[in-house]
Image (tube, rainbow, N blue to C red):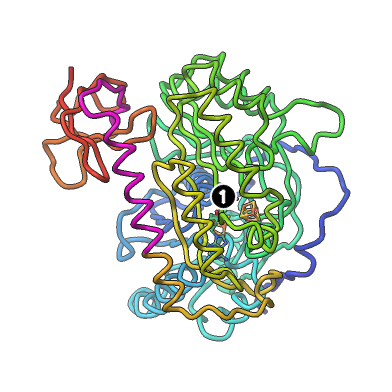
């Protein structure tokens, strides 16, 4: 008999009043499950998934699994999925279809589907019916149990579907095999309580819960001791960190300041919600040089009608006031955003309001999307009268304006000296190195690979739309 525990979107919508407990990870009683075996994880979606992948890798490596580079030579394959838009899901279903033939050649290959897609009822039903070569399906709330699941499937030779719709405790001290040697993700909170009407995340990631500050500070200190140069604080809505603490007023601004004092060279954070971006946070970003001058501040739309229907809880004017305040206090800041076009009932006038806001906000980049209905969210039942062609045309018009912002953002560093954290050889030329500036601009320059992982000064000779070209000083 297969093991089955399926998701329930209705239950996922509920926010329980139960306190979240913090527990420490207990090492598995299973030992060396992966001796002589290899694993591979394909990660889709946002940094939350990338961070989960590092935990899954940590758990597997603790069991002596070795990371492999190809499906052909792997014993365990995990697809860590994203549910944010339909095309993200279609990619995963396409991949699952292709995997059928790999399983025929290698029947011992264990295929697991993880991440946000399994949190949706329809996805699990579809996998059960059409993708019977998938062995394990688990969600975002039980990553820590993966070894147990794998053991069950390896020993019992049966399928296991276990998805919880209610978040559990916060588990600290999970093993992590970090992908990078000098840049690290640090989760500071999980889940989201915003319920923007288009968004599936509050259903797939559960209610907002913040990690205790001591664990975060300890993690960052350890990263610093291990030579890490940059940390990115992660949360769906990072600036609401701490609002769920019942016995303390410790806030995101407090955490930022405590971490900035540790002298880690670069601190980033993502993603910020405009409604919670307090003056305190602006002040701390302005005050500390190691909090880099780069803020990703998703606006979604410039129309007050649309913002209201999206349940974003601010107006165009609120957003522009916030942006002005940020430019005033942190003149060197680079701002980027996320925008959705073609939200149900968005008119041409609404869209023109978005273009106007983009112009006024002087963004130096943006992720732009065509609205994609997600089953179970309120907006999925709104009448949608915008044709695909119209939505695409708006996306195209928006992108032209956004690209001007990328160009302008890069241009302001031409003939300036910038600090670059060197990441490695550039994507196109092996004798060229690349890295990012404090304003999150990509720089390519000639240099010796011995400086990978260092922060170096580079003189910018030329600014292009997508990158800067420079010379090491
Ligand atoms: N928590 C973050 C990021 C969420 S997902 C935030 O609030 O900003 C990243 C982006 O995907 C969102 O900012 C939004 O622009 C986009 N997005 C979310 N749901 C979408 C949907 N149903 N259709 C199209 N884009 C969507
Ligand atoms: Fe989704 Fe809104 Fe939460 Fe971001 S803040 S994850 S867009 S519900
Ligand atoms: Fe996708 Fe889940 Fe992140 S839906 S964007 S992977 S939180």
Which quadrant is home to the N terminus? bottom right
Q: Position of residue 105 (x, y in %)?
A: 33, 77
Q: Is residue 58 above or below residue 470?
A: below
Element under disc 1: loop
On whether residue 412 falls in the magenta region, the answer is yes
Q: Is residue 70 above or below residue 239?
A: below
Q: Position of residue 176 (x, y in %)?
A: 51, 39
Q: Position of residue 78 (x, y in %)?
A: 47, 61
Q: Nearer the viewer, residue 153 or 280?
A: 280
Which quadrant is home to the C terminus? top left
Quarter of image, res 136: bottom right
Q: How many marks?
A: 1
Residue 270 in the figure: left or right of residue 403? right
Q: Nearer the viewer, residue 204 or 31?
A: 204
Start and end of the magenta stretch? 397-422
Estimate how packed mark 1 is, as few (under 14), some (14 to 19) or many (20 or more) residues with alpha carbons within 10 Å: many
Q: Would you say residue 154 is visible in this rendering?
A: no
Outermost residue on the front side: it is 349
Q: Is residue 137 above or below residue 331?
A: below
On whether residue 148 falls in the magenta region, the answer is no
Residue 163 in the figure: left or right of residue 436? right
Q: Position of residue 231 (x, y in %)?
A: 48, 30
Q: Would you say residue 232 is visible in this rendering?
A: yes
Q: Which residue is mark 1?
A: 299
Residue 453 in the figure: left or right of residue 459? right
Residue 2 in the figure: left or right of residue 181? right
Q: Residue at x 57, y 39 (%)?
A: 234
């Amino acid at each position: 008999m297969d093991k089955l525990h399926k998701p329930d979107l209705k239950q996922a919508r509920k926010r329980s009043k139960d306190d979240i407990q913090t527990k420490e990870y207990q090492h598995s009683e299973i030992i060396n499950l992966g001796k002589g075996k290899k694993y591979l994880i394909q990660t889709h979606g946002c940094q939350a998934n990338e961070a989960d992948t590092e935990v899954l890798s940590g758990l597997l490596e603790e069991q002596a699994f070795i990371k492999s580079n190809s499906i052909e030579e792997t014993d365990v394959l995990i697809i860590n999925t994203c549910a944010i838009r339909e095309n993200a899901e279609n990619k995963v279903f396409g991949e699952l279809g292709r995997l059928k033939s790999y399983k025929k050649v290698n029947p011992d290959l264990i295929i697991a589907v993880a991440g946000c897609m399994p949190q949706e009822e329809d996805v699990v039903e579809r996998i059960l019916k059409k993708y019977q070569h998938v062995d394990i399906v688990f969600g975002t709330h039980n990553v820590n149990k993966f070894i147990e699941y794998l053991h069950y499937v390896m020993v019992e030779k049966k399928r296991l579907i276990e998805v919880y719709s209610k978040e559990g405790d916060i588990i600290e001290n999970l093993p992590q095999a970090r992908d990078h040697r000098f840049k690290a993700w640090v989760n500071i909170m999980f889940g989201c309580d915003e319920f923007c009407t288009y968004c599936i995340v509050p259903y797939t990631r559960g209610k907002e819960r913040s990690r205790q500050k001591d664990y975060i500070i300890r993690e960052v200190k350890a990263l610093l001791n291990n030579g890490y140069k940059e940390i990115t604080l992660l949360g769906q809505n990072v600036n609401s960190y701490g609002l769920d603490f019942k016995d303390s007023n410790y806030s995101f601004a407090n955490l930022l300041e405590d971490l900035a004092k540790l002298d880690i060279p670069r601190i980033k954070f993502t993603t910020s919600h405009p409604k919670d971006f307090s003056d305190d946070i602006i002040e701390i970003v302005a005050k500390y040089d190691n909090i880099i001058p780069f803020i990703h501040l998703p606006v979604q739309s410039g129309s007050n009608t649309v913002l209201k229907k999206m349940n974003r809880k601010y107006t165009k004017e609120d957003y522009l006031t916030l942006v002005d305040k940020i430019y005033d206090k942190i003149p060197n800041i680079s701002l980027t955003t996320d925008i959705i076009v073609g939200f149900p009932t968005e008119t041409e006038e609404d869209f023109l309001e978005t273009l106007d806001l983009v112009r006024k906000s002087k963004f130096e980049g943006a992720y732009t999307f065509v609205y994609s209905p997600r089953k179970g969210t309120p907006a999925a039942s709104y009448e949608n009268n915008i044709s695909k062609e119209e939505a695409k045309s708006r996306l195209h018009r928006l992108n032209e304006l956004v690209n001007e912002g990328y160009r302008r953002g890069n241009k302001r560093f031409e003939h300036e000296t910038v600090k670059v954290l060197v990441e490695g050889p550039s994507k196109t030329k092996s004798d060229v190195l690349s890295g990012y500036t404090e304003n999150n601009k990509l720089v390519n320059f000639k240099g010796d690979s011995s400086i990978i992982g260092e922060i170096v000064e580079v003189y910018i000779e030329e600014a292009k739309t997508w990158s800067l070209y420079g010379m090491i000083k």
